[in-house]
Amino acid sequence: MRLLLLLCCLTCLTALDQAGRDQARAELRQLAAESTRLSRCFNLVHEIVGPSVVAIRTKERQVVLTWGGRAVREVDAGEGSGFVVAADAEQAWILTNAHVVLQSDGQNGFQKRRDGSYVGYDRLRVVLHDNREADAVYVGVDVPSDLALVRVPIGGLPAVEWADSEQVHVGDWVVALGYPLGVGYSASAGIVSATDRSTGIYEAVGGFESFIQTDTAINPGNSGGPLVDLQGRILGVNANIVSRTGANIGLGFAIPSAIARRVAEDLRANGTVRRGALGVRLEEIDANLARSLGLPPAQAVRVSGIDPLTPAEQAGIRAGDVVLAVGGTPVASIQQFRGRLATRRPGEQVQLTLWRDGARSQLSLRIADRDEIDRALAKAAEELIAKATPLANLGCRVLPDSQGLIIVQVEAGGLAADGGLSPGDRILAERGLGKLITVEHAAQLAALRDGVIQVQSGRRVAWLRFRG
């Protein structure tokens, strides 16, 4: 019976073979003609952007002891990719990853000199698309964004066009260009798998993580190369992958162009990147807590504190406010918030959408320069310290308020430091003196050689014994 059924099926296939083949061939030609348009997009992306993509080979000098004495030799240290972001008649500027051109410390960070600067490689050799080669010099490195700008003495190179990564959508076609695994220039295609992704890889250096995720093949050596849309514009800088094997498994991540473009422009103009700040301290809240606040059940970001002398304080942001969006773009994590802010320069206005007391509100803030805020806070701290009462027996300085004595400075090696106290903690009371809220109380405490104090650090309250 089974044999008879098989013969019948074969007979049907044979009977339909010629007509079916003709129909299938006609349909295939129609579909192939349509798909050729997509293939042509990939062809044109390569033709337009490919000449801007370069290979970067890093080299180190090593001292070798020989029978004839000491000798210096140059060895290959690694390789990556980059692309031309600007050029004139005499030189070109190339953007790549910081981890391509900086020496690693072996712990997800980079080696530093005694002055705190980062250690680059002894030589950067850039290979252009037409196989010309040149040594590059460092222009600037921005470790938080994992980006670096180098310059080569070759003019007239084609610079890339930028896309707006804020407009990218899951499912968009993208092409990754670069020089993976030493096999030479390569292009690979895929789609955008997700946006605003964080992998935790930059936590050690306090970096920004708001990656574009793609299933486009990205392998070692692709780092620093461009992720391109089908209009031949740069959507991101290929940066890292997640893999158990070290090879591509379809989880690639790129730094968004909104961050990369700004960093490239700042590094070219100044050699450094100015960071903006609003002065908010944030915490992430889960879906259950969001629901209890009257929000949709999703992860959200809430303000846990406000720094003094900052735009957040001046605009009236409060602890407990939930940040729903930055510049109209929703945020659901601290990394997303930091990534949104990293795309903007100090002095620009940014609009925050907040959730407060069951209602939405919007505030417009002027982004401050982080360094200026740090200087202002340092100056204010110096003024507070100058007014504070020294407690030599505890190794700290305090200012009184209605709740206790606020610690504004802690001396290294003192009893306060040994007890784990830090600026911002309070001394509430002493066993024999009672509550401490005035300058006179601080002076009485300073006169004690031993005692027991009640201290508050965050939400924790404890009693500590000291003896001079």
Image (cartoon, rainbow, N blue to C red):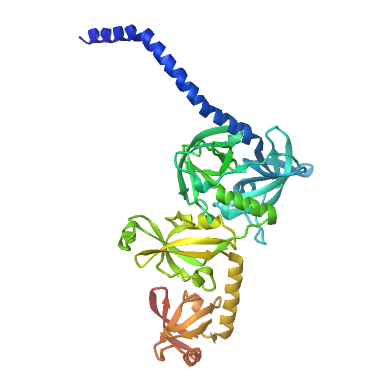
* Quarter of the image with the N terminus in it: top left
Q: Is residue 183 above or below residue 33?
A: below
Q: Is residue 48 above or below residue 304?
A: above
Task: Name the one closer to the observer, 391 or 294.
Answer: 294
- Can you name the residue that lies furthest to the left here? 1
Where is residue 42? Give x, y as percent: 55, 31
**Left or right of residue 57, residue 364 in this image:** left
Q: Which residue is located at x 73 percent, y 34 percent?
A: 132
Instruction: Identify the image quadrant of residue 47.
Output: top right
Where is residue 177? Give x, y as percent: 58, 36
State how many labels appear: 0
Q: Is residue 421 above or below residue 391?
A: above
**Left or right of residue 271, residue 304 in this image:** left
Task: Name the one closer to the observer, 414 or 292.
Answer: 292
Task: Name the one closer to the observer, 95 or 17.
Answer: 17
Q: Is residue 436 visible?
A: yes
Q: Which residue is located at x 54 percent, y 33 percent?
A: 188
**Left or right of residue 381, residue 198 in this image:** left
